[in-house]
Amino acid sequence: MLRPGEVTGRDLAAPLDFKGRMLVSVSDADMLASAYVNGELGPREGSDALAVVPLGAHPRDLKAFEAPVSNSVAGPPAAVAVSPDGRYAVVVETFAPRSAAERAGERFSDLRPGRALTVIDLGDPTRPTVVQVVEGLERPDSVSFSADGSLVAVTHHPLGAGRAAPIALYPFSSGRLGTAVAPAIPGWLPGDRLIHAEFHPHQSLLGLLNETKAEISFVRVEGMGEGVRLVAHGNTVRIEKSPYLLRFTPDGRHAVVNGLYWGPDVQGTWNEAPRGSVASVRLDAGRDRDGSPRHALVSRAQTGVSPEGLAVSPDGTLVVTTNLERSYLPYDDPRQTFFSSLTLLRLDPRTGALSRVGDFPSDGILPEAAAFDASGRYLAVTTYDHYDDRRRGGAIDFWRVARDPLDPARLELVRTEHAVPVTRGVHSMVLVK
């Protein structure tokens, strides 16, 4: 029998074989999470950064390698995208960094809209290197790579360039962004917020998320160079209030969308968000008389409060949301929950039916993003900040998708003791398989 502290040559740690090549995340060092509520940015912790965590070692031995890259948490957790070959990352800058000299009393409203699109070479994961910075249109919200890696789609907030050009398409070749084209979106009304555009995993097709109208639509990307155009692909589907992210299932048959329910009610009064939701939309669920595809909302399920992050497992059978709850509030705010959470749902890859497994609490602040590993047995989750202020920085935490061999229907999410420290403010993350 082992005595306390005694170690043998055998590994006594529970197995945690997180599959993949690397995790790529970005951190916004400019603001405390509570700045969303009281406007006070608080003390800065370092500089905005992109972090690369090469995988393959035991989780206790993993570490992050960072490069300075401007970015902002003030948008959906889709501020970084990685090329299909895993060689390059592109990061959008929704708001520019704070002034070089930190000033007392700096507020969220002092931040200037950003324009930078940064390309980072990931060829050596231990030395991520900035290879290009492009001045794009003002206040980009999200970024996505096409399936063949030849195009990068960037959406823009209507208070920036988004009223005139809600989307820009950049050709991408040899690790460089080319000259952008801002094609018209069929049926799009100026002022609507295109909060996220996501490329289909197999087709030259974009899913467009209209936050203003709570709708999802699909467009085909046709032509090349300056002749690129967007062509409507089927009907628009009404979804639920305050959609934030769109993820396609790996086979491309369904689009999964979260609903945050933020914003004012019909009387114009701002309401505290209730529990959120996930909805699944079946692409090509039928055909209209003219032969055009008919998409349909097929299922919905409830989540925790403010499910900003959204991830689909590699086999398309599980969905996880990362729920902010009210973890981002100032500590002295009576609404502060002092917990955040994850919601686990089952997804039928054939029908798109969703069924809620449960909520799983965490003691981290603002868990913006999650990524399944390549096996679907583990989960990486970002923690923006910690309730213990003596613990500096953010973290990428590792969770286990646990099953009971004697009860195959039972599923649990279990946070492990393993985490990788990163710069405070981590909010968007991608697994490179």
Image (spheres, rainbow, N blue to C red):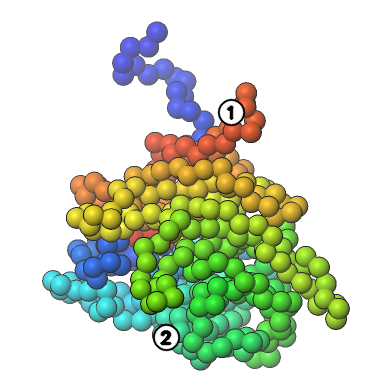
Which residue is pictured at 25% across the width and 79% down the height?
110
How many numbered callouts? 2
Residue 53 place in picture, x, y as percent: 45, 51
Which residue is pictured at 62% across the width and 89% down the height?
184
Q: Is 102 on the left-hand or right-hand side of 162?
A: left
Quarter of the image with the N terminus is top left
Residue 52 place in picture, x, y as percent: 45, 56
**Kind of element beneath mark 1:** strand
The answer to whether one can see residue 365 in this image is yes
Which residue is pictured at 62% across the width and 43% down the height?
375
Which residue is pictured at 68% across the width and 52% down the height?
353
Q: Is 407 on the left-hand or right-hand side of 132?
A: right
Kind of residue at disc 1: Asp
The answer to whether one can see residue 27 in this image is no
In the image shown, does 164 or 131 lie closer to the viewer? 164
Report, in whole angstroms, how far the alpha carbon at label 1 lies from the one at label 2.
50 Å
Q: Is residue 273 above or below residue 270?
A: above
Instruction: Count neighbours of disc 1 (C-alpha within 10 A) and say few if under 14, some if 14 to 19, many if 20 or more.
Output: few
**Kind of element beneath mark 2:** helix
In the image shown, does 36 or 140 lie closer to the viewer? 36
The quadrant in which residue 368 appears is bottom left
Marked residue nearer the N-terminal end (1 or 2) = 2
**Which labelled disc corresponds to residue 404?**
1
The quadrant in which residue 300 appears is bottom right
Kind of residue at disc 2: Gly
Instruction: Count neighbours of disc 2 (C-alpha within 10 A) and say few if under 14, some if 14 to 19, many if 20 or more.
Output: some
Residue 122 place in picture, x, y as percent: 50, 61
- Given the current orientation, which residue lies at the most extreme left position? 104
The residue singled out by tag 2 in the image is: 160
Q: Is residue 431 above or below residue 84?
A: above
Residue 279 place in picture, x, y as percent: 60, 60
